[in-house]
Image (tube, grey):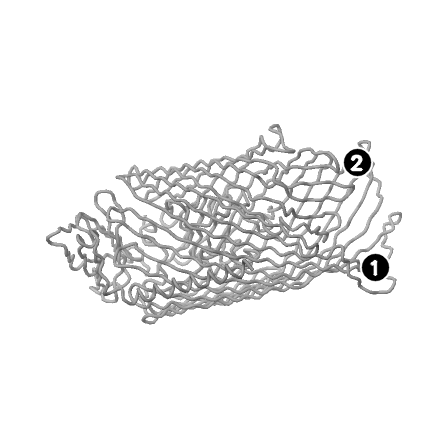
């Protein structure tokens, strides 16, 4: 009942916001603002033309900066005639930066607006083309570009060769501070406890492998998020921004990529802007076949200090397909109001087969038991997303109001069949063929909805106030049905003791406020976010309900001191939360592998996390350097509890410990020569965990972990380029709590070193409209996932390997119209200057 009432209130409130602001927007032109900001405002106008052809330049960018402190005040874009006009500019002294792809950036210094003469027409401004020196007219980004904002790093993906025909996982391989494990899991500064969102919203994608790289425009890495972001995500937030072009005219691209081992990817995206309407859409499909091996050896100490051994060797193949359709439209009601809608529908299929040998031996390695197990799985999922967004801007620069409603759902169906093949250990021959043992099906339904609104109000002195609210509802409905095979009557019988139905509901209501300003060279931003959380964990099978309700405050602080335009210091703080998910909470015992049992704990409380960062930034024409220090403190840490019972490993979770980590990171970018740029990233960090089952002398608490990556793109000719990417992770140590059947103890996990080298090449044809990309991942087949787990009464070693050396070849073709041919894609304002230097 409480969730139905909340849904009605959210829907009604969001509808009123949309309706009210559209009405206000329609009357915006007749409403006068009588504050001091408009009383002292003026106009700056002019015309931008090509210095050789005298033709007007459309879409040139004009930025206005205060002369005294270089604060960005306002900006404009030229129209089809090359004209621009900026209104409501306060009186004062300014300088202008005028830029456009393919032209030299022009600085227009000493622009004065007086109170008596508040209109300034700069007349004709001529831009000089770089085509004379470059000998080409199409300039597009061929590598990732990193932009440092006050609270995040923004990486523009560009035409990265390792992303062509790949997925979001391939994109993440090139992002500073981010590492990717061999199983595709993402770590940020050594921690996997992060929140990944798409276009600022949660996504029902179960894996980043399901998101084609061709859809991604840029990636935002937010290690210390401000109060405008959800407080969820201990280490930070990774926001994947999808492509959408609103330039007048049409733009489209089609691509196809094939990889060794039956891997295929195709995508088509199209954008058309006509007057007040902008339409966009894309279709992507991906067919992927993979294989891998898992080898596990466990030594288990039992009574009288005797030891038993279990050796498992698994080989698996997996077949997956993913089809995704995305459509949307923007309606520009007038110059100040925009209404946007988008919808996504996808179908996912996944099937696989794995065989595993299970070898049981005693203390002197004599075989006691042996059998093979086979698992066959077949699953299908459907995902849907709907998004409605309203944006209202004002004549005052930077002032805006936005409102949004977002809904997503996903469903999964299918199941798994488990069979066993017993062996005669005296002869090591199978007694009979595979016998069905058990089958399970795990249908699930997941829903998410949120309504949010944000408002930004600038002040005349350059300060800014932001405020907003958000209310969200999440529901995960998980079923698990088990049937056992009865060979005597050749029938399947339901195992009611293992069948399970679990429902998790979550409602979070949040409000925040942020104030930002500057004093000379000092910038600051302070914020506070309040979140009310209500959760219900319903174990339907046993008719047991667990409820939790709590309110928390999350302050944020971001400070920056600029020595000059190119150097500065940053200091930031944020408080975060990590709520346990449905998998952590569900007490059902998962026995898909009878020798490795997992179950959740419905009594878990959320973790809380305090993060501090201190950074120095240096940005010049040919290089940039950003070293940073970070410290993270975690309270109420959710610990993994491992218990060995005979030959069976049982894993669950408890709030037992406290944790902290600290580290040092370097991000460095250098232009070696014309067009050749190298990006490097080094991170050093150390974990320290204390609490029940952990001591300060724990081996893992005294180890330093580090990662490094190098990404370099080298233009051989203006139509041919090479790219190299190298990733390295040192052995990773982390302490765990481990318990024997009776006594508590301590242990640690060691993930062994992992490294890989990737190579790519790109060739452009037909005036850069057609491109051929060839790349080879993991050239020397060195990528792996090997680890050791040490407990008081057991040692387990894991050696995981999957298909990683893959050769891809892809073609892409783009079309564009309604804009000058000298610019196919605007990726970054001063790209041509970097290529020249």
Q: Give x and y (percent) for residue 323.
A: 55, 66
For discs 1 and 2, the disc positioned in front in the rendered view: 2
Viewer-nearest residue: 543 or 139: 543
Quadrant of the rendered structure where residue 342 is? bottom left
Viewer-nearest residue: 386 or 529: 529
Q: Give x and y (percent) for residue 528.
A: 41, 44
Specify the farthest residue to the bottom.
Answer: 274
Q: Which residue is mark 2?
A: 302
Q: Is residue 703 above or below residue 195?
A: above
| 345 on left or right of 467 | right
Q: Which residue is mark 1?
A: 433
Q: Is residue 299 above or below residue 548?
A: above
Task: Identify the element where label 2 is drawn.
Answer: loop
Q: Give x and y (percent) for residue 799.
A: 67, 45
Viewer-nearest residue: 811 or 503: 503
Viewer-nearest residue: 77 or 694: 694
Quadrant of the rendered structure where residue 653 is? top right
Q: Give x and y (percent) for residue 288.
A: 60, 61
Residue at 60 percent of width and 28 percent of height: 696
| 32 on left or right of 724 | left
Tell me the CA gap for discs 1 and 2. Answer: 33 Å
Image quadrant where one finds the N terminus: bottom right
Task: Identify the element where label 1 is drawn.
Answer: loop
Specify the farthest residue to the left.
Answer: 116
Neighbor class of circle 1 (other Cα within 10 Å; few <14, some 14-19, many 20+) is few
Q: Earlier in the sequence, mark 1 or mark 2?
A: 2
Neighbor class of circle 2 (other Cα within 10 Å; few <14, some 14-19, many 20+) is some
Residue at 50 percent of width and 66 percent of height: 344
| 388 on left or right of 376 | left
Quadrant of the rendered structure where residue 242 is? bottom left
Q: Is residue 305 above or below residue 755?
A: above
């Amino acid at each position: 009942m409480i969730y139905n009432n909340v849904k009605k209130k959210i829907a009604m409130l969001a509808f009123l916001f949309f309706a009210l602001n559209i009405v206000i927007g329609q009357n915006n032109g007749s409403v006068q603002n009588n504050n001091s900001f408009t009383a002292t405002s003026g106009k700056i106008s002019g015309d931008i033309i090509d210095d050789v052809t005298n033709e007007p330049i459309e879409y040139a960018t004009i930025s206005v900066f205060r002369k005294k402190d270089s604060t960005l005040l306002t900006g404009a874009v030229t129209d089809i005639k090359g004209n621009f006009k900026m209104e409501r500019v306060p009186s004062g002294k300014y300088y202008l930066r005028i830029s456009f792809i393919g032209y030299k950036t022009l600085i227009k210094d000493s622009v004065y607006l007086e109170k008596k003469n508040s209109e300034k027409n700069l007349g004709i401004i001529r831009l000089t083309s770089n085509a004379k020196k470059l000998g080409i007219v199409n300039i597009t980004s061929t590598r990732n570009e990193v932009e440092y904002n006050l609270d995040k790093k923004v990486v523009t993906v560009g035409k990265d060769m390792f992303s062509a025909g790949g997925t979001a996982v391939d994109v993440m391989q090139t992002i500073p501070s981010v590492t990717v494990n061999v199983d595709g899991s993402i770590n940020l500064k050594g921690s996997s406890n992060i929140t990944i969102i798409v276009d600022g919203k949660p996504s029902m994608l179960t894996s980043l492998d399901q998101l084609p790289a061709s859809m991604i425009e840029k990636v935002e890495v937010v290690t210390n998020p401000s109060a405008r972001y959800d407080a969820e995500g201990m280490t930070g937030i990774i926001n994947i921004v999808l492509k959408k072009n609103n330039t007048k005219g049409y733009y489209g691209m089609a691509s196809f990529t094939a990889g060794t081992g039956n891997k295929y990817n195709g995508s088509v995206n199209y954008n058309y802007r006509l007057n007040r309407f902008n339409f966009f859409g894309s279709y992507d499909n991906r067919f992927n076949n993979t294989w891998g091996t898992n080898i596990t050896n466990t030594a288990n100490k039992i009574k009288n200090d005797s030891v038993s051994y279990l050796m498992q060797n698994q080989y698996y193949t997996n077949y997956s397909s993913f089809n995704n359709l995305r459509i949307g439209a923007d309606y520009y009601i007038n110059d100040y109001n925009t209404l946007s809608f988008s919808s996504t529908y996808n179908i996912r299929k996944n099937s696989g087969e794995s065989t595993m040998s299970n070898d049981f031996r005693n203390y002197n390695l004599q075989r006691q038991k042996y059998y093979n197990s086979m698992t066959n799985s077949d699953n299908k999922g459907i995902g849907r997303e709907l998004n409605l967004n309203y944006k209202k801007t004002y004549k005052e620069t930077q002032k805006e109001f936005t409102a949004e409603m977002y809904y997503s759902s996903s469903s999964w169906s299918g199941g798994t069949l488990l069979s066993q093949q017993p062996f005669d250990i005296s002869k090591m021959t199978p007694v009979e063929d595979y016998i069905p043992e058990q089958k399970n099906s795990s249908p699930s339904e997941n829903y998410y909805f949120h309504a949010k609104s944000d408002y930004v109000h600038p002040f005349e002195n350059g300060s800014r106030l932001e405020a907003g609210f958000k209310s969200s509802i999440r529901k995960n409905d998980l079923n698990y049905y088990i049937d056992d095979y009865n060979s005597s009557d050749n029938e399947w019988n339901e195992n009611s003791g293992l069948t399970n139905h679990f429902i998790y509901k979550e409602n979070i209501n949040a409000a925040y406020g942020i104030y930002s300003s500057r004093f000379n060279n000092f910038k600051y931003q302070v914020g506070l976010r309040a979140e009310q959380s209500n959760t219900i964990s319903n174990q339907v099978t046993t008719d047991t309900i667990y409820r939790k309700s709590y309110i928390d405050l999350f302050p944020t602080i971001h400070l920056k001191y600029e020595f000059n335009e190119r150097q500065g210091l940053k200091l930031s703080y944020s408080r975060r939360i990590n709520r346990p998910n449905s998998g952590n909470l569900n007490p059902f015992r998962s026995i898909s592998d009878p020798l490795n049992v997992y179950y959740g704990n419905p009594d878990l409380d959320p973790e809380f996390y305090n993060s501090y960062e201190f950074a120095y930034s240096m940005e010049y024409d040919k290089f940039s350097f950003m070293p940073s220090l970070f410290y993270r403190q975690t309270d109420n840490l959710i610990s993994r509890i491992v218990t060995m019972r005979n030959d069976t490993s049982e894993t669950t979770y408890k709030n037992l410990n406290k944790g902290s980590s600290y580290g040092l990171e370097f991000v460095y970018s250098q232009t070696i020569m014309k067009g050749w740029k190298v990006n490097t990233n080094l991170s050093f960090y150390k974990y320290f965990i204390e609490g029940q089952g952990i001591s300060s002398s724990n081996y893992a608490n005294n180890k330093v972990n580090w990662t490094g990556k190098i990404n370099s793109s080298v233009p051989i000719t203006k139509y041919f380029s090479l790219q190299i990417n190298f990733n390295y992770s040192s052995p990773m140590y982390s302490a765990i709590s481990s318990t024997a059947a009776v006594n508590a103890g301590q242990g640690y996990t060691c993930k062994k070193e992992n490294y890989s080298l990737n190579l790519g090449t790109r060739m452009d044809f037909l005036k850069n409209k057609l491109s051929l990309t060839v790349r080879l991942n993991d050239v020397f087949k060195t990528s792996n996932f090997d680890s050791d787990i040490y407990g008081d009464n057991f040692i387990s070693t894991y050696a995981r390997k999957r298909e990683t050396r893959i050769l891809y070849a892809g073609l892409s073709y783009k079309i564009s119209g309604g804009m000058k041919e000298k610019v196919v894609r605007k990726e970054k304002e001063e790209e041509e200057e970097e290529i020249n230097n």
